Image (spheres, rainbow, N blue to C red):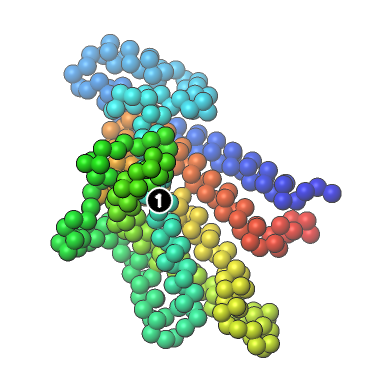
């Protein structure tokens, strides 16, 4: 008898590879058919035709598309995305500097979502129809309907006015004289270096952009958690537990919350993946200098190698987040581990 969980994991890994291959083909073709010559854009309008042709040859743009594609995929697998036409550095170097900044912001936002949205969803479901339910529903609706950039600007204005010493720009106070270490995550590098003043300052810089970025997810996850809790309250085994006099807090936290965790966990994984690409507005407002704003600049400058790398890395995070969520959901709900064997 074959191992069903192992088979499911291999199936998901195969799907992961196919999605990444499809994404690579799509973005490569789109980047080639978009109007504008990357070599001409890199050299400027004053460059001669000979200079443009020489750069096109150096970049391999004079070769057939199929040859260009397989050459690029082979180099990308080795971590070689070519040179950025804007920064004049290897794209992988730019990614190593910008990806950790965005990941630190996004992970902090997801933590905010979890510690705010899930308890709020549980409480509003537990006290359905009361004032706390009304407040929670208003807050969740506000988070879903108001765009993150408006939250970001509002937080900046409020804190600049009421708390002028609170940081509203950048990742760290330059007066601390600290540069990111091996991981690029200021919280981790500061802890490893024993610089807890850096950790504290990095947390203060993270607070506003992370909260602004998390608001939409908080609203959505609160509503989904509330709906799942209310739906599962009507299940037969939950009604049976109540009839036997099991305390309500035990029913909520030991049975209902676990049963209702699948939907919000799925949304949280999707939110993590989407925030990687959608964080550019918040990053620009807070001068964050992360991966999302780097990708936006690459698109505006038609930096071909950087654009393809940014999309591939974003797709990698998206697919990887879905893979992790699938595995977590399988661990939470044992029924999913045996569904394929029936």
Asked if residue 303 is positioned above or below residue 39 in the image, the reply reads below
Dividing the picture into quadrants, the one containing residue 293 is: top left
Out of 116 and 89, give the one closest to the viewer.
Answer: 116
Asked if residue 142 is positioned above or below residue 105 in the image, the reply reads below
Residue 35 seen in the current view:
no
Residue 80 seen in the current view:
yes
Query: Residue 237, image x and y in percent?
Result: 68, 79
Q: Residue at x 22, y 56 (%)?
A: 166
Q: Secondary structure at mark 1?
A: helix
Query: Residue 312, image x and y in percent?
Result: 46, 37
Q: Residue at x 38, y 43 (%)?
A: 194
Out of 247 and 14, give the one closest to the viewer.
Answer: 247
Query: Residue 305, image x and y in percent?
Result: 39, 28
Q: Is residue 252 left or right of residue 88?
A: right
Residue carrying label 1 = 106
Q: Is residue 33 left or right of residue 15?
A: left
Asked if residue 247 is positioned above or below residue 340 in the image, the reply reads below
Q: Residue at x 54, y 75 (%)?
A: 229
Query: Residue 65, image x and y in percent?
Result: 47, 24
Dividing the picture into quadrants, the one containing residue 143 is: bottom left
Q: Is residue 24 left or right of residue 211?
A: right
Out of 45 and 334, give the one closest to the viewer.
Answer: 334
Asked if residue 255 is positioned above or below residue 128 in the image, the reply reads above
- On the rendered image, what quadrant is the C terminus found in? bottom right
Out of 46 and 227, give the one closest to the viewer.
Answer: 227
Q: Residue at x 51, y 64 (%)?
A: 264
């Amino acid at each position: 008898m074959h191992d069903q969980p192992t088979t499911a994991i291999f199936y998901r890994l195969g799907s992961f590879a196919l999605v990444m291959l499809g994404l690579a083909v799509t973005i490569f073709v789109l980047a080639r058919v978009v109007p504008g010559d990357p070599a001409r854009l890199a050299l400027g309008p004053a460059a001669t035709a000979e200079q443009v042709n020489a750069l096109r040859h150096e970049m391999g743009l004079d070769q057939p598309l199929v040859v260009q594609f397989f050459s690029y995929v082979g180099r990308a697998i080795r971590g070689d995305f070519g040179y950025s036409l804007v920064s004049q550095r290897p794209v992988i170097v730019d990614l190593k500097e910008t990806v950790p900044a965005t990941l630190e912001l996004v992970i902090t936002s997801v933590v905010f979502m979890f510690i705010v949205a899930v308890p709020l969803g549980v409480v509003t479901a537990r006290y359905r129809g009361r004032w706390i339910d009304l407040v929670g529903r208003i807050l969740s609706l506000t988070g879903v309907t108001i765009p993150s950039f408006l939250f970001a600007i509002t937080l900046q204005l409020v804190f600049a006015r009421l708390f002028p010493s609170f940081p509203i720009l950048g990742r760290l106070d330059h007066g601390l004289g600290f540069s990111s270490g091996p991981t690029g995550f200021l919280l981790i590098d500061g802890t490893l270096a024993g610089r807890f003043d850096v950790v504290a300052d990095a947390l203060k810089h993270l607070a506003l952009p992370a909260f602004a970025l998390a608001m939409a997810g908080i609203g959505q996850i609160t509503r989904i958690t509330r709906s799942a809790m209310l739906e599962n309250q009507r299940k037969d085994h939950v009604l049976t537990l109540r009839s036997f006099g099991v305390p309500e807090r035990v029913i909520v936290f030991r049975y209902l919350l676990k049963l209702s965790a699948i939907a919000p966990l799925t949304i949280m994984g999707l939110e993590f993946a989407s925030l990687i690409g959608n964080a550019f507005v918040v990053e620009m407002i807070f001068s964050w200098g992360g991966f999302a704003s780097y990708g936006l600049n690459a698109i505006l400058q038609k930096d071909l190698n950087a654009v393809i790398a940014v999309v591939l890395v974003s797709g990698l995070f998206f697919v990887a987040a879905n893979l992790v969520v699938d595995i977590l959901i399988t661990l939470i709900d044992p029924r999913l581990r045996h569904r394929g064997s029936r």
